[in-house]
Amino acid sequence: MKKQHIIIFVTAPNQEVGELIANTLLQKKLAACVNFVTPVTSLFSWQGDIEREEEVLLVLKSRADLFESDLIPVVESLHPYEVPEIIALPILMGSAKYLNWIDEATLNK
């Protein structure tokens, strides 16, 4: 069966929290790669107010079969936000070598 590769976005309040999440996911083989985009200015609605925060955006490469049961609980356990952003988008196409590398670098289920 062909594996579904995904890109995951996670925002973190700062570099330190972002690196903790990234290193943990890499060590557990739940992500093959994590890119940091910083700083990111986020405007969002929270508890009836419009909030503005400087954050760090993590862009992870992984597989769909690891997302809900494995990756989300790890991120939530390390993240200080009550409702952290943890969203995934499918990778529709990619170089076979790169997609194979994601498979090799992540947990074999």
Image (cartoon, rainbow, N blue to C red):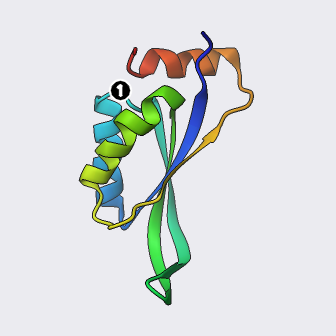
Q: Residue at x 53, y 44 (%)?
A: 8
Task: Label 1, secondary structure: give it.
Answer: loop
Which quadrant of the figure contains the C terminus?
top left
The residue positioned 27% from the left and 64% from the top of the image is 80
User: Pointer 1: what residue?
Assistant: 29
Q: At x 58% / y 35%, what residue is drawn? A: 6
User: Going by the picture, which residue comes out furthest to the bottom?
Assistant: 49
Q: Residues within 10 Å of mark 1 (few under 14, many from 20)?
A: many
Q: Residue furthest top?
A: 1
Q: Residue at x 46, y 75 (%)?
A: 54
Q: Position of residue 87 (x, y in %)?
A: 53, 50
Q: Position of residue 60 (x, y in %)?
A: 50, 41
Q: Residue furthest right?
A: 93
Q: Is residue 78 above or below residue 31?
A: below
Relative vertical location of residue 28 with respect to residue 96 in this rendering, above or below: below
Q: How many labels were placed on the picture? A: 1
Q: Is residue 79 left or right of residue 43?
A: left
Q: Is residue 1 above or below residue 23?
A: above
Q: Amino acid at mark 1?
A: Lys
Residue 76: x percent and y percent?
Answer: 31, 52
Q: Is residue 90 left or right of residue 50?
A: right
What is the quadrant of the N terminus in the image? Answer: top right
Question: Percent x, y for residue 11?
Answer: 45, 60
